[in-house]
Amino acid sequence: MKVRGLKVIIYILLDVCVCFSTVYPKFSRSLDKTGFHRELLTSVDMPRELLPDYFDGGDIDCHMLFREVIPSGAYVDPFQLQEQRHFGGPDVKVVDPVDVEKPEVQSFEIVALVYANLTSDGDSWVASYSLPIHLRYHSISPDVDNMEVIFQKPEIFLRCNDAKSGITHYGYRGETVRQESLGCSSSDIILCDWSMIQLHQNSSLHAWVPVGKTGHFTIVTVGTVIATTAACFLLIAKALKCYTTKGTKDS
């Protein structure tokens, strides 16, 4: 009897553990390439049990939205994104104005909304994109060789609706943070109800930007002046030579 009672308790505890276990989306992120021009790769792997009503050929349609906050030490080029969109690039709406010429010290954060579709991948739905990122020039420093630019994890939203009626479908089985009204698409002024999903992964990416040294200021300035002056004299000499040669031929 005691053994049987112990087994019953174990089964009950196992059932409780299963009931309280939670499945979360898997979030991955990386910075590709080197130098001042990078690719920000982002992917969310959504287990199918979190969207039980969403399947191929069904009436429910789901989309994802990533709210990226680009730090002041970097920027996205709206014209580049618009051009890439024609060739299958990410669907992005840049919320803030962007000046690609300004250095980091004169720049601010940029908010960009990235819209992505869910594609089937085995037992999961996957939303991913590659965002071209450009690092800005930083101010010179007396003792630092590189400055750090930190890319925080984006806020991730999910929206599902009935394809026939257009009514919002709240069928997500995972944890959510809040509801928020955002554009239904990158080109749409109509607002839709999006659910910000909970991710239990706090990941940020770091990029390092080389900066000039204040101790090199005099050397760089003198060298630049000398090189510029020499180039001007060479151009003038070349122009005078061409003019003299032409005058000789004409005479």
Image (cartoon, rainbow, N blue to C red):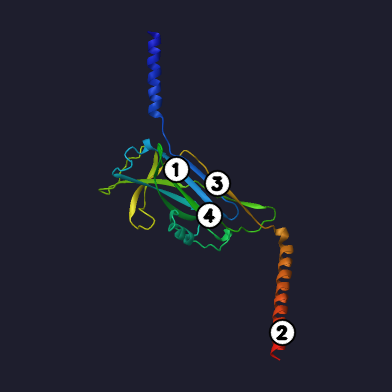
Q: Which residue is mark 2?
A: 245
Callout 2, which amino acid?
A: Thr
Give the image location of residue 175, x and y in percent: 39, 38
Q: Which mark is residue 44?
A: 1
Q: Which is more foreground, mark 1 or mark 3?
A: 1
For the residues marked 1 and 4, what is the alpha-carbon distance in whole angstroms? 19 Å
Q: What's the distance in space between the residues labelled 1 and 3, CA to CA?
A: 16 Å
> Contact (CB < 8 A) between labels 1 and 4?
no
Q: Quadrant of the N terminus?
A: top left
- The circle on residue 205 is 3
Tell me which numbered mark, 1 or 4, is placed earlier along the sequence.
Answer: 1
| Cβ atoms at labels 3 and 4 below 8 Å apart | no
Please name the amino acid that badge 4 sits on: Ile
Q: Compared with residue 163, is residue 245 higher up or lower down, i.e. above or below?
A: below
Task: Say which label, 3 or 4, has the lower sequence index.
Answer: 4
Q: CA distance from mark 2 to mark 4?
A: 51 Å
